[in-house]
Image (cartoon, rainbow, N blue to C red):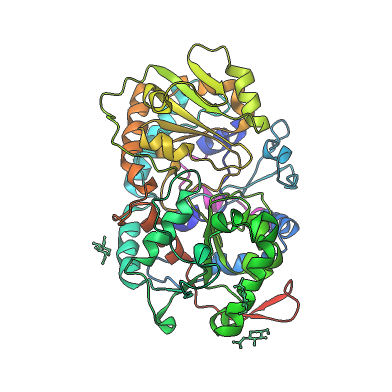
Amino acid sequence: MKMAENCFIHWWRFSPSRRRQSSSRGGGGGGVSLIPTSLAVASFVLVVLYISLTSKFLSHDRHRLTYPHDQAQSTHLTITQFSLVKDDQRQPQTTAHDYAPPLTLPPAVKLESTPTKLTSSHDHHHQKAQTDSSTKPEFPSTGSNVNNHEVFHEEDIFLKNYKEMNKSLKIYVYPHRRSDPFANALLPVNKEPGGNYASETYFKNVLMNSHFITKDPSKANLFFLPFSIASLRNDRRIGVGGLPGFIRDYIFNISMQYPYWNRTGGADHFYVACHSVSRLAMHKADRVKLNAIQVVCSSSYFLPNYVTHKDLALPQIWPRHGSPDLNSAKRTKLAFFAGAMNSPVRRKLVQAWKDDPEIFTHSGRLKTPYADQLLGSKFCLHVKGFEVNTARIGDSLYYGCIPVILADYYDLPFMDILNWKSFSVVVTAMDIPLLKKILKSISSEDFSVLQGNVLKVRKHFQWNRSPVDYDAFYMVMYELWQRRSSIRVLVDDDPTNPTYNS
Ligand SMILES: *[C@@H]1O[C@H](CO)[C@@H](O)[C@H](O)[C@H]1NC(C)=O
Ligand SMILES: *[C@@H]1O[C@H](CO)[C@@H](O)[C@H](O)[C@H]1NC(C)=O
Ligand SMILES: *[C@@H]1O[C@H](CO)[C@@H](O)[C@H](O)[C@H]1NC(C)=O
């Protein structure tokens, strides 16, 4: 139930009105029946209207949202409650500057889903949250972590599904010869992956040697399109400009040579890319955008081409080596950020805190060792740059620093499995001026919980040459497993008008 609910739409903002709303609901458990059905229906219509206005792929999206293949887990999605909240003063505005189309959500509508049933431990946390929030100063967004002690939304379900996934998931990879002119981009590379886009290379290298691979397409749950966007981008024959044509031709080729693409219009196919040019690369391959599972680092709710719930967030991880001594780290600074000033959010951050003795912000590359800052700070800021994603979350976790996420609309990796509030602080860009207040309002007790949880989730954000259970590779496999589907998609000649038939 909880997982399903977390699959829906996450609103990474904590407005005062919402806080009031949630505390007056008395723990969030039983309020559902009090909401008149008509109000719920009206909100739902508005939401659907909003989705249909911003996505021409509505029908597919809905199909993805409701597919019932996993009876055991009952991933049937129920929208239990929407609340109408007046929110005139605090319009979402941040990422609109950069890439996203302006947010067209009707101003009075906010989405919120509430669990209908809570376990006793959740009840306990909720009660605790209530008492605590009455004694705490009311800041617009404290990112209150009090009822977020658990790293997993539903650990038992996760572990059970994981076992099942590990046993049954089979992937067919389109085969290519060493002599293929594009073998460099289609086959795994021998070199140890490194740098910003390592996730893409790691994934393919590990997958190809894993027990998930099947040579028998009739046994496959999913089909992997093995092209590497990162290497095609650097390939002189292709380059950024040649990517869309290459992908179109690649899809054409496999759809002529094999029956699998046509069978589902690509819905049981996936590709993996960490560089954000993958977005442009799919420009001439509508069905990849519409139907396939795009496993990408640049996972933002408000970017065209990324379809939340169909596509999935690949964590961007710069592989770090050596084992930092996390126990003896002396975290004397409150918060740390360094990076290029390539976004309004970053500029705003540095402007607000450049002379602060406790929050250290640095524009550009650091002259001192990066690891020293990550080991010497309590909180490490992940701030949106050109894209919502950077390797900073992985870096923070690696060095045991609590990530503070300042990247509105980031569809965070593994969000349906992990409770991000238990190990990070999510802040809206609008709250940059309040950053210090927000961080200082976190009690030392909550701080230790967050920090302890950072150490617990650390392994999920690491790649290993030979995969280790629950590492980044297995987590991505789990997410793919959640998206497997046996629904056939019939596509007519107009690719923008797919008809669905289960
Ligand atoms: C997953 O499968 C691998 C390979 O068969 C095995 O080594 C590992 O123990 C399995 N993990 C779990 C949690 O079942
Ligand atoms: C598609 O197939 C043609 C003919 O075999 C080949 O020349 C071309 O390189 C292939 N293109 C891609 C992107 O796979
Ligand atoms: C897949 O569909 C295309 C376009 O309709 C068609 O030309 C092609 O022959 C089909 N592929 C196979 C293997 O049947």
The answer to whether residue 135 is magenta is: no
- Give the quadrant of ligand 3: bottom right
Is residue 398 or residue 455 the one in the foreground?
398
Residue 225 in percent (x, y) is at 52, 69
Residue 275 visible in the picture: yes
Q: How many marks?
A: 0
Q: Is residue 282 left or right of residue 368?
A: right
Quadrant (top left/top right/bottom left/bottom right) for the N terminus = bottom left
Say above or below: 355 vs 393.
above
Residue at position x 61%, y 78% in the image: 253
**Which of the 4 quarters of the picture holds residue 126?**
top left
Q: Position of residue 30 (x, y in %)?
A: 47, 49
* Residue 138 seen by the camera: no
Point out the stretch of residues depicted in magenta: 25-41
Q: Nearer the viewer, residue 444 or 201?
A: 201
Q: Nearer the viewer, residue 291 or 174?
A: 174
Residue 315, how many percent across, how many down? 47, 48
Residue appearing at x 37%, y 60% in the figure? 206
**Where the C terminus falls, by quadrant?**
bottom right
Left or right of 326? Residue 111 is right
Q: Position of residue 192 (x, y in %)?
A: 38, 51
Whether residue 58 sits left or right of residue 33 in the image: it is right
